Image (tube, rainbow, N blue to C red):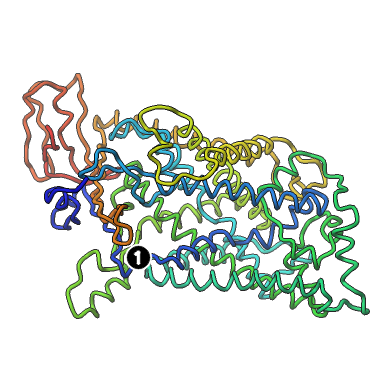
C-alpha cells in the first residue's frame, strides 16, 4: 500500500527543539557515514565468540569426559547446538520488535537495539505502558544488568598479564596475588569503558583490529598443529610426533572413568579444539589432578621444545590480547542493551542512563567541520550506560574478594555467566520462540515473521531441550577427580545453579519494590516510546528506525484521601485545580521530586488526554 504525503511526513526525523527535556529524550540513529559495516558486524561476532574460553577451557572438556572420543563428540554436538541457537536468534532478531508503520495495517519487524529484551517482551508481552505492567522487562533486566559482563574474563586477563610479565608462575605452588589481579582487572575494565566513552569510532577500530589478530592466531594454531603432526617440528631425542597422535586417537579413544552426568553436562557448555590434540598428549591433562595447565600453553610448550618459560609467557600474552578484545565487544554491546532497559523507566535516573551524549571525538568533529553539523551527524555514545556497565562489572569482582585465589574467582564468575546468560537465557528465548511458533492466535507468527528457517520450529525445540538438560544436570554433584569438583573449582557444586535459577526472581522482587514505591508516593510512571521509521535505502521493502522519542511522565494515582478541589503545585509555581472526579487525577503530571525513576518535569503540566 502506497503512503500518502501526510504518512510520509510522519516518517521524518523529529528535531531536538520539539523535545521537552524535563521528561523526554530524543535518540537518533547514527548517520550513514557512522553506520556499522559488514566487516564490523563480523568482527563484533568474532570478538564476542573468541575470548578466553577457546584457550583456557578445552582441557576441562577433555578432563570432564575423560577421553578424546567423548571430547570430540561433545565438540561436534556443541557445534550442532550452536547452529540451532544461531537460527533461533536470527528468527528473533530479524522479526522483533514489531512496530506499526504508517500506511500499513499490520505491524512489521523493524530492527532495534535491545536483543533478548525485545524478544522476551514480544513472546511474553507486558500488558500496558505503566510501571505495574513490566513484569517480563524487570525479570530479564535486573539479571542482565548484574550478570551480563565479563568480570570473570577481566580477572583472567589480569592473570594472563601477570604470567606474561613474569609476576606469576602458573606452574608454581603459589596462587596469583589477589590485590594485583583485582587492580589489573579493574584497570582493564576502566580502560575499555573510557575508550568507548571517548570515541565510538575508536572503540570500533580497536574491535576490528583485535578480531583480525585473533582469527590469525587461531589459524596459526590450526596450521601449526597440522605441521607438528606431519613432522615439521621434530620432538627431542629425534622421536616422531606420530606416537602422540596414536596415543590420542587410536588408544582408548572412548575408554573413560568419568561416568558422572554432571561432568559431561558441564563439559558440553565448553569447547575443544582438535589441533591441540595433534600436539599435546592427553595424559598430560588426564593425569593432572589440579588441572592447572591449559591446552593452549601445553600446545606451545610441546610445539617449540626448549625454553618452556618463554613459551608460557608468549601464550599468556596472546591469550590476554584475545580476552581484551572480548572485553571491548562485550562493553560495546552490553551497554547499549542496558541503555534500552533504562528507556523503560525502571532504573534510578532512567532518562540519564537512556540518553546518548556527545563524545569527545564528537566535539572534535563539530570543531573541525567547515559546516554546522546536525545533531544526528555528530558522534554520540551511551555514556551513562557505560558507567552502569563498569559499576556492575567491578561490583562482581568485589563480591568475589572473599575468594582469596583469583583462579577460583575466575572459575566462579565464568561458570555463573555461562549458566545464566548462555544456559538460562538461551532456554528462555528458545522456549518462548517455540511457544509462539506453536500457538495459534492473532499473532500468526509463522506467517508474519520476516525470516523462516528451514525445519522450523525444530531448532528452538532442540536448543530449548539441550539448555534445559544442562540447567537441570548442573544440580547433580560431580564426583571427586572431576575438573568441576569443588577441589578444583573452589566452589560447591550447587551454588552456581542456585544463584543462576534465582536470576529472574531478582527482577520479580525488584518489580514488587517498584509497585510499593509507586504506592508510597501515590504516583505512577507512564512510559511511552515513539519510533520514527523510514524505508531502508538498501532494501526498499524494509524499514529501519531513524529516531525515537522516549517519554517518562509521573502521574498522580487516584486516592480515597484526595478531597474534591485538590490542587498540586509544581516547581514553577503553577497550580492546577482538579475539580473532576478523583479518578480523573490520573492524568496529572507530578513534580521533579520523582526524577530518580523518570523525568524531572516540574512545571505542573497536565498530561496528554487529561
Q: Mark 1 points at which residue?
A: 35
| Spot occupied by residue 143 in the image (x, y as percentages of width and height) | 48, 42
Which residue is at the front of the view, 405 or 497? 497
Q: What element carries label 1?
A: loop
Residue 237 visible in rendering = yes
| Spot occupied by residue 153 in the image (x, y as percentages of width and height) | 59, 59
Which residue is at the front of the view, 468 or 393? 468
Instruction: Mark 1: give few (<14), some (14-19) or many (20+) Cα within 10 Å.
Output: few
Residue at 63 percent of width and 70 percent of height: 161
Quarter of the image that includes the C terminus: top left
Which residue is at the front of the view, 454 or 168? 454
Compared with residue 378, is residue 140 higher up or lower down, i.e. above or below? above
Residue at 64 percent of width and 55 percent of height: 410
Residue 569 occupies quadrant: top left
419 to the left or right of 202: right
280 to the left or right of 325: right
| Spot occupied by residue 275 in the image (x, y as percentages of width and height) | 74, 65
Looking at this view, name the residue that lies furthest to the front.
Answer: 1
| Spot occupied by residue 551 in the image (x, y as percentages of width and height) | 23, 45
Amino acid at each position: 500500500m502506497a503512503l500518502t504525503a501526510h504518512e510520509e511526513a510522519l516518517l521524518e526525523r523529529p528535531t531536538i527543539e520539539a523535545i521537552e527535556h524535563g521528561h523526554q529524550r530524543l535518540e537518533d540513529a547514527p548517520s550513514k557515514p557512522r553506520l556499522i559495516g559488514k566487516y564490523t558486524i563480523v568482527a563484533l561476532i568474532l570478538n564476542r565468540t573468541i575470548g578466553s574460553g577457546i584457550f583456557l577451557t578445552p582441557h576441562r572438556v577433555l578432563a570432564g569426559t575423560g577421553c578424546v572420543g567423548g571430547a570430540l563428540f561433545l565438540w561436534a554436538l556443541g557445534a550442532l547446538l550452536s547452529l540451532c541457537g544461531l537460527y533461533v536468534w536470527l528468527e528473533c532478531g530479524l522479526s522483533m520488535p514489531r512496530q506499526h508503520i504508517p500506511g500499513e495495517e499490520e505491524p512489521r519487524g523493524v530492527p532495534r537495539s535491545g536483543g533478548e529484551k525485545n524478544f522476551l517482551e514480544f513472546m511474553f508481552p507486558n500488558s500496558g505502558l505503566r510501571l505495574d505492567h513490566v513484569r517480563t522487562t524487570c525479570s530479564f533486566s535486573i539479571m542482565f544488568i548484574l550478570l551480563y559482563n565479563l568480570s570473570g574474563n577481566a580477572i583472567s586477563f589480569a592473570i594472563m598479564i601477570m604470567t606474561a610479565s613474569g609476576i606469576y608462575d602458573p606452574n608454581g605452588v603459589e596462587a596469583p596475588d589477589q590485590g594485583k589481579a583485582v587492580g589489573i582487572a579493574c584497570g582493564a575494565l576502566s580502560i575499555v569503558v573510557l575508550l568507548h566513552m571517548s570515541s565510538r569510532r575508536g572503540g570500533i577500530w580497536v574491535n576490528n583490529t583485535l578480531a583480525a589478530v585473533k582469527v590469525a592466531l587461531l589459524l596459526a594454531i590450526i596450521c601449526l598443529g597440522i605441521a607438528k603432526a606431519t613432522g615439521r617440528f621434530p620432538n627431542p631425542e629425534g622421536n616422531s610426533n606420530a606416537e602422540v597422535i596414536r596415543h590420542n586417537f587410536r588408544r582408548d579413544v572412548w575408554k573413560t572413568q568419568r561416568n558422572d552426568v554432571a561432568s559431561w553436562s558441564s563439559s558440553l557448555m565448553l569447547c575443544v579444539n582438535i589441533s591441540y590434540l595433534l600436539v599435546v598428549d592427553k595424559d598430560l591433562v588426564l593425569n593432572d589432578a589440579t588441572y592447572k595447565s591449559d591446552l593452549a600453553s601445553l600446545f606451545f610448550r610441546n610445539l617449540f621444545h626448549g625454553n618452556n618459560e618463554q613459551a608460557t609467557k608468549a601464550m599468556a600474552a596472546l591469550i590476554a590480547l584475545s580476552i581484551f578484545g572480548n572485553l571491548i565487544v562485550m562493553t560495546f554491546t552490553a551497554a547499549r542493551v542496558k541503555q534500552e532497559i533504562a528507556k523503560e523507566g525502571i532504573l534510578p535516573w532512567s532518562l540519564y542512563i537512556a540518553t546518548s551524549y556527545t563524545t569527545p571525538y564528537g566535539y572534535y568533529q563539530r570543531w573541525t567541520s567547515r559546516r554546522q553539523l546536525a545533531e544526528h551527524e555528530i558522534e554520540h555514545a551511551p555514556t551513562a550506560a557505560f558507567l552502569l556497565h563498569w559499576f556492575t562489572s567491578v561490583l562482581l569482582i568485589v563480591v568475589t574478594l572473599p575468594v582469596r585465589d583469583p583462579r577460583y574467582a575466575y572459575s566462579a564468575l565464568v561458570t555463573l555467566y555461562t549458566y545464566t546468560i548462555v544456559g538460562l537465557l538461551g532456554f528462555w528465548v528458545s522456549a518462548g520462540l517455540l511457544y509462539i511458533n506453536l500457538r495459534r492466535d492473532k499473532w500468526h507468527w509463522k506467517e508474519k515473521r520476516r525470516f523462516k528457517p528451514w525445519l522450523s520450529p525444530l531448532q528452538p525445540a532442540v536448543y530449548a531441550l539441550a539448555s534445559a538438560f544442562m540447567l537441570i544436570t548442573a544440580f547433580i554433584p560431580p564426583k571427586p577427580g572431576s575438573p568441576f569438583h569443588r577441589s578444583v573449582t573452589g566452589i560447591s557444586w550447587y551454588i552456581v545453579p542456585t544463584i543462576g535459577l534465582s536470576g529472574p526472581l531478582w527482577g520479580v522482587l525488584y518489580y514488587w519494590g517498584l509497585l510499593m514505591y509507586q504506592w508510597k508516593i501515590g504516583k505512577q510512571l507512564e512510559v511511552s516510546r515513539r519510533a520514527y521509521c523510514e524505508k531502508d535505502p538498501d532494501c526498499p521493502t524494509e524499514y529501519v528506525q531513524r529516531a525515537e522519542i522516549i517519554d517518562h511522565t509521573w502521574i498522580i494515582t487516584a486516592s480515597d484521601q484526595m478531597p474534591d478541589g485538590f490542587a498540586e503545585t509544581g516547581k514553577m509555581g503553577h497550580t492546577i485545580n482538579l475539580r473532576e472526579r478523583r479518578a480523573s487525577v490520573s492524568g496529572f503530571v507530578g513534580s521533579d521530586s520523582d526524577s530518580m525513576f523518570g523525568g524531572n518535569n516540574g512545571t505542573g503540566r497536565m498530561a496528554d488526554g487529561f
